[in-house]
Image: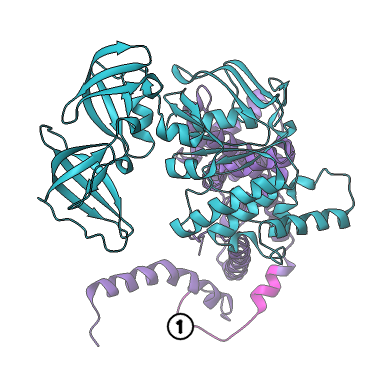
Amino acid sequence: MTDNPMIAFRDVQKYYGDYHALRGISAEIRAGEFFSLLGPSGCGKTTLLRTIAGFEDISSGAVLIDGKDMANVPANKRPTNMVFQSYAIFPHLTVAQNVGFGLRRDPRSKAEKDKLVEESLEMVGLTGYGARAAHALSGGQRQRVALARALILKPKVLLLDEPLSALDRKIREQMQVELIKLQREVGITFVLVTHDQEEALVMSDRIAVMFEGEIAQLADPETLYRRPNSRRVADFIGVMNFLPAKVTGESGDTITAEVAGLGTLDVATSQVSMAPAGDNAAVGFRPETLTILYEGQQATDREAPGTIDEVVYYGDMTYYDVRLDGMEKPVRISMRNVFGRPVLDVGTRTRVSWSPGALVLFR
Amino acid sequence: MKISSLKLYALAYLVFLYAPIFLLPLFAFNDGTIIAFPLKGFTTDWFAKMAENDTLRHALTNSLIIAVTSSAGATILAVFAARASTRYKFKGKGGIMGLIMLPMVLPDILMGMSLLLVMLEVLRVNLSIATVILGHVIISLPYAIAVLQTAFATLDQSLEEAAVDLGETRMSTFRLIVLPLVMPGIISAFLISFTISLDEFIVAFFLAGNQPTLPTYIFSQLRFPSAIPVIMALGTCLVAASILLLSVAEFFRRRGIKRTGAKDTGGFL
């Protein structure tokens, strides 16, 4: 990986009239990485993507691609290509004409271009589809045509605007894997916009989580999941149980906190998120870091008694809502349904195993 | 068989609409100068007389020139207006579009009178078929715009962005992507303007000077009972031509839809 970023945002601001869509975005996207912009609708992620493509002017700041300021470079001259949410397949052209559209101004011979189109179709698994009418394709096939069309120009950056949101779950998961493989194969920087946190976690090298025109956290998927820097990010990425906590002492690398239902515990400073968590501090647990102890099982670290409030069966997993003794709100616990492990009933008294090392303290 | 009252109503409705048109060929082929039943023998004389009539041919030529030119003009202007109104936001858009669409609801006689005034007193030009063309562009423009607005509004904007993204300029994008996709709308707009112009009477009456157009000629001939069978023959030809034209237009519209895989939202037929 080179030191120079492929894309650099320098304090990018964007106003639509009075509406402040991008509030000072500064970030860098490395060459060859699979980068995702993740956030709820209206957070500005698509707007940010479109500033890279050149479809959106910025009010102030700068967008640099491969070290070059894009301020006066129009969309048709930028080294980026885009896969649109609607795929934007030209309905009056054939598949081959769609894929080869970007080669229109290319000086190479027709035979060479035809060969390129054929190679691109092969790359996305559509060999032999060239002569078909583009409008007769299925959603998954359109997506592949859009990909081939965008990649044929060998852009420095491929921009993907919610490319999988219109597909069925099965095809979507298949395309996720194919996109990752494709990105490794071509080595082009991919920037993906998505509102689906699972998709972002599965596909990305790094993710920028955005809320209200700002980047809340930029990190690799594991850090984002294990060490979210705010309650909001934690809440957006997967499921997080929040328990009200009170910080009672600090010494060196350790913070002592009192948590309702769990008692007093020591937390390493590396587990602490300093982003404001409102008036009260809280600790957060992911559902899989908590374990329900069956008869005769020993806790690996600590345990707390409780009662099962709700059972949601998912086939491979079961989600339990367990109300720990002395707490108002139940915590969510996920258990794998390994062979021989019975699904427990609502109302069962149980013990929950937990470890202070698995939590995040928000203060 | 029991026929419900609604069916009967629908039937009566259709008879009322179309029966008068069927009378045209009936009397056009009737061997008699008086338009009345009972019918006499079969003849094609009236069609022969129609073909020999120089004034009629002159009126027909005038009308065709006016219709083709004015609908071409109206369609081109409508492409710009419809594109602007569906794609861009600008100050005073509502007012401007409202003014352009106004002739649709304005009485033709007002249009005719005011245009006559403008031609004679303001522009000081001689009345000719050129002035009729100008008038017809103004009155058919709103209809052409209405048709084209639908065509442009259903166009996915990301198609244009995709073309720009792939290296095309705005102009070449318009030519390569937008134009082919709105072509069915352009053809519709042209045909609607064409029909409006071809049978337009009032504005043509005011602005044509001493030049006959088909409607003004037909109207002038209605005073002479002996000319009426020829008018019937002419009417028959016009009905046949209209049916042919609409069929061709519908054929192209359906083919266009089939090509782009768009949903058929209904055409003229």
Q: Would you say residue B110 sits in the magenta stretch?
A: no
Residue A256: give x, y in percent of width and height.
Answer: 26, 18
Q: Which chain comes out purple in the rendered image? A: B
Q: Would you say residue B37 sits in the magenta stretch?
A: yes
**A70 and A218: which is toward the camera:** A218
Quadrant assignment for the N terminus of chain A: top right
Residue B148: give x, y in percent of width and height.
Answer: 56, 46
Chain letter of mark 1 equals B
Q: Which chain comes out cyan in the rendered image? A: A
Quadrant assignment for the C terminus of chain A: top left
- Give the residues in magenta: B36-50
B208 with respect to A325 (left or right): right
A220 with respect to A302 (left or right): right
Instruction: Tell me the kind of residue under disc 1.
Output: Pro
Look at 41% across and 66% down and name the residue there. Answer: B17
**A276 and A37: which is toward the camera:** A276
Look at 69% across and 71% down and name the residue there. Answer: B49
Q: Is the magenta stretch mostly helix, strand or loop?
A: loop
Which residue is denoted by mark 1 in the rendering?
Answer: B38
